[in-house]
Amino acid sequence: MADWASSRAKTARYDTEAERRPVKPHLAPQKASEHSTGFTSQVAGMMADSIVDKAIKDRTAQLENEGWNGGYNNGYKVEANGEMKSKDDEDKDGAGADADDDLEALRARRRKQMKEKKQKNAALGHGGYDEIAEEEFLKVVTSSNLCVVHFYHRHFEKCKIMDMHLSKCAKKFFGTRFVKLNAEKAPFFVEKLAVRTLPCVIVFIDGVAKGRQVGFEGLGGEEFATAQLAWKLKEWEGIEEEVDPDEEF
């Protein structure tokens, strides 16, 4: 071996330049010429895909021989792509799908309930601002879950202002029934509810008085905004919808 190396060293000076270049294997794909059809690259890609497919099939066959047989083995099974998936992962996927179905069913029931409630409220007169007689009072305040009654006097200017604001509230807050009652024609309920100052607006929840607005107290005078009155009614839970105190009606 030493003799060959010594002899090679003596003759190396006679090598041509091409012979002195190191030999490198073509590991990287050759650069295609401008006239290339890409056939070589396509063949190489097909060969790579074939190798991957064969590896997956071999791995699947190996696992089946070990007792997998498409089912679970020690909590795992083989997917079609050769990957292993645990039973816990599959259960989670199934649970997620069931949760989505349950959520959609819940939303559907909620939409149905809201539609039925809206139809019921419309039949009871929600959305309007009507005058009722003393004989209708008990039926009105007990038929709707939320009811606002304005005790008024037909000659009081402040009562007319209150009418204007309550009429706007009635159109916006459909979950509440808004009505007015002439205090002169309802002496029994004026006495029972201790109505002493007009206008007097009383909030009823399931027929029980929960709060009242006496005159313009706390509203900032006769030029108050409808949203201010709505906010007060909301504080007594007389309105179920959200109320923005700065909103312009």
Image (cartoon, rainbow, N blue to C red):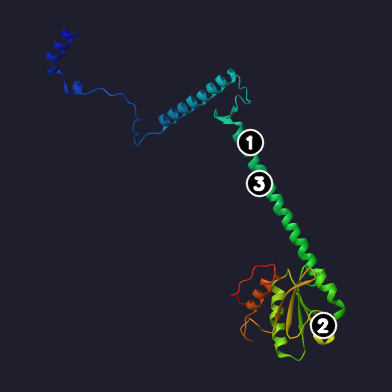
Name which residue lies at 48% across and 24% down: 51
Q: Position of residue 189 (x, y in %)?
A: 83, 80
Can residue 225 be seen here? The reply is yes
- Closest to the camera, between mark 3 and mark 2, is 2
Name which residue lies at 68% across and 49% down: 103
Above or below 187: residue 65 = above
The amino acid sitting under disc 2 is: Glu
* In the image: residue 24, left or right of residue 172: left
Choose between 10 and 233: the one closer to the eye. 233
- Closest to the camera, between mark 1 and mark 3, is 1
Above or below 206: residue 67 = above
* In the image: residue 207, left or right of residue 67: right
Q: Position of residue 144 (x, y in %)?
A: 79, 69
Name which residue lies at 74% across and 61% down: 114
- Which quadrant would residue 39 be assigned to in this image? top left
The residue that label 2 is drawn on is 191
The residue that label 1 is drawn on is 91
Looking at the rendering, in which quadrant would you find the C terminus? bottom right
The amino acid sitting under disc 1 is: Asp
The residue that label 3 is drawn on is 100
Above or below 18: residue 35 = below
Residues at marks 3 and 2, CA–CA distance in whole angstroms: 56 Å
Choose between 35 and 248: the one closer to the eye. 248
